[in-house]
Image (cartoon, rainbow, N blue to C red):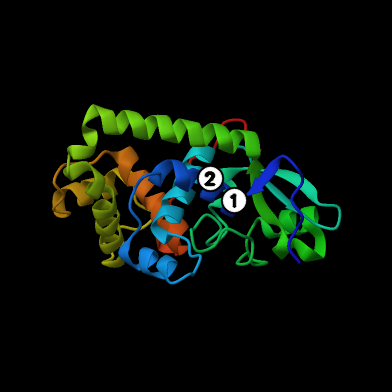
Amino acid sequence: MTAIIPIGFVTLDEAAEMIAKSLYMGVEDGELVATLRQSGLNVRDGQASDAAISEIWRAADAGRLRVVGIGGNSRKIVRLDPEDLKEIPLLRSPRGGNFHFLRPSNRLYGQVTKWFGPQWADAVIAFREKEVAALTRFVLRTRRKHLTSGDAKKSGRPTLRPEMIGVIKKTIEAGKWNPTMSLKALTRLVNVHGGLAQNVSEDTVTRGLDDLFDQTGDRRFQRRKKAQRGAR
């Protein structure tokens, strides 16, 4: 049984639908999506949905969106740390978005089950609707600025990120880097052996590594987090 969402909140899927409109408004549907819709099927554009979900988590990490979990018999609302959610397999992935893959061995299992009780797996990720609406406006302004500035005509930049993530994946799968090593070392490997059109920064590689872990849940792609000041 899925939790009932209180007024003023939207689920991850609802937020993604709102953001996708700002990201892809006026953009022609992909060939497969267009064909299915013409046949009468109401299908979602997977590419648009994936991009929207990535935008949501980027905003959450930056503090633009407050993330909550809603569940349990009393529809309890709990503020969640986006950084913690990276430790729950597939929760931040476009193919996940829930607590279904949380296991007793995970350090967050006890806390999640305490919050939401026996039906913890049915708890949903949600956001304040006003904050998501503000994010849609921000995304639309950013997109408009991007289009009017002529940046959209530059061909190298949009394809660099997925290409870089592919290089990171191959580097780790080949055993050339592991989470006990520094991110600086991974960045050097990506720039020296990746064959990218331009060098990327350590911050860019770090974000790419986090995206890879979010998408796969594979612990080979999970980096060590720096201890936060004041943490107990």
Above or below, 161 against 123 in this view is above
Q: Position of residue 59 (x, y in %)?
A: 50, 38
Tell me: 109 left or right of 159: right
* Quadrant that contains the C terminus: top right
**Classed neighbour count for the residue bearing mark 2: other residues with Cα under 10 Å, few (<14), some (14–19), many (≥20):** some
Can you identify the residue that label 2 sits on?
A: 18
Front one among 2 and 67: 2
Q: Which numbered circle lies on residue 125?
A: none
Q: Residue at x 69, y 43 (%)?
A: 9
Residue 81 in the image: state x and y as whole percent.
Answer: 61, 43
Q: Amino acid at mark 1?
A: Glu
Position of 100 with respect to 115 (left or right) is: left
- In the image, 58 versus 19, the foreground residue is 19
Report which residue position mark 1 lands on: 14
Q: Which residue is depicted at the point 38% across and 31% down? A: 142
Which of 5 and 27 lies nearest the eye of the viewer?
Answer: 27
Q: Is residue 224 visible?
A: no
Label 1 crowd bin: few (<14), some (14–19), many (20+), radius 10 Å: some
**Picture quarter containing residue 96?**
bottom right
Amino acid type, label 2: Met
Quarter of image, res 63: top right
Q: Secondary structure at mark 1?
A: helix
Q: Can you say whether 60 is above or below 134 in the image?
A: below
Outermost residue toward the bottom? 39
Q: Could you say where residue 149 lies in the image, as x and y percent from the top left?
A: 24, 27
Instruction: Check if mark 1's residue and mark 2's residue have beta carbons within 8 Å.
Output: yes
Q: Quadrant of the N terminus?
A: bottom right
Indicate the position of residue 14 as horizontal and vertical percent values.
59, 51
Measure the alpha-carbon separation of dots 1 and 2: 6 Å
Secondary element at tag 2: helix
